[in-house]
Image (cartoon, helix red, strand yellow):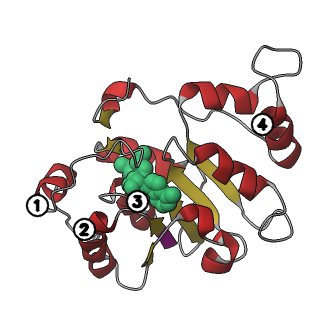
Amino acid sequence: MADTRPALPPLRDVIARHGLAASKALGQNFLLDEQLLDRIAAIPGPLRDAPAFEVGPGPGGLTRAILRAGAKLVAVERDRRCLPALAELEEAFPGQLRVISGDAMATDAHAEAGDGAHIIANLPYNVGTPLLVGWLSAQWAPLPWWSSLTLMFQMEVAERIVAKAGSDHYGRLAVLSQWRSDAKIAMKVHRSAFTPRPR
Ligand SMILES: C[S@@+](CC[C@H](N)C(=O)[O-])C[C@H]1O[C@@H](n2cnc3c(N)ncnc32)[C@H](O)[C@@H]1O
């Protein structure tokens, strides 16, 4: 069957054209390998016409993969420099993407993305844990309003989320995550996949 998905420029070109030099303060480590991004977007299962919510689309790598999977996506990005690149994706996937310019910490994901949304994000390291705690707690809406959480963290945070009782990493985050969800490490991504490469 012919591939009817829009042809998009390589992410490296998007970053260069829009001057998106990574900001450490905003926790920016971009993923550029489209095959890897498609594998991440496949983790929640079929997304065709499903509501989805992404934090920190940045230049739009994971965003493209979620859109290619057919989701109806709301994405919130704090870095205004990324907005023109994301506007190009809004055009390439008509009616599928709505970008919110703002802080995910102050965004009501339930109100924006709706019941049953799949939350998918390569999270900025500085707000990843508080965002997870918010989605797992009854902070925004009766639980669980979301269908799934597919979230990329640094390995040490992922280990704290899935830690078993009695292990060194076991604590509040493990208790909350495992109470509210069936928490698993779905995939490990080597630091060499990120631009810039994190320490
Ligand atoms: C680790 S990068 C991921 C970028 C892109 N999704 C990817 O996978 O290549 C984190 C993104 O979150 C954005 N960000 C940081 N803090 C944020 C916040 N409080 N609210 C929304 N976006 C934020 C950054 O600007 C950056 O684009």
Q: Is residue 30 visible?
A: yes
Q: Determine the residue positioned at 53% across, 31% down.
A: 154
- Mark 3, Cα crowd under 10 Å, few <14 / some 14-19 / many 20+, is many
Q: Nearer the viewer, residue 140 or 61?
A: 140
- Mark 1, Cα crowd under 10 Å, few <14 / some 14-19 / many 20+, is few
SS for dot 4: helix
Which of the marked residues, 2 or 3, is nearer the chain's N terminus?
A: 3
The residue under label 1 is 17
Give me the disc on residue 25: none
Q: Determine the residue positioned at 17% across, 49% down.
A: 12
The magenta stretch spans residue 171:
no
Which of the marked residues, 2 or 4, is nearer the chain's N terminus?
A: 2
Residue 129 on image: x %, y % = 65, 43
Q: Are marks 1 and 2 in contact (CB under 8 Å)?
A: yes
- Please state which amino acid type lies under the numbered disc 1: Arg
Q: Which residues are magenta?
A: 71-75
The residue under label 3 is 57
Task: From the image, state whether disc 3 or disc 4 is nearer to you.
Answer: 4
3D distance between C-alphas at marks 1 and 2: 9 Å
3D distance between C-alphas at marks 2 and 3: 10 Å
Give the quarter of the figure containing the N terminus: bottom left
- Mark 2, Cα crowd under 10 Å, few <14 / some 14-19 / many 20+, is some
Vertical comparison of 23 with 185: above or below: below
Q: Are marks 3 and 1 in contact (CB under 8 Å)?
A: no
SS for dot 1: helix
For the residue with label 3, is its CB less than 8 Å from the closest atom of ligand 1?
A: yes
Residue 156 on image: x %, y % = 60, 24
Which of the marked residues, 1 or 2, is nearer the chain's N terminus?
A: 1
Q: Determine the residue positioned at 61% across, 78% down.
A: 112
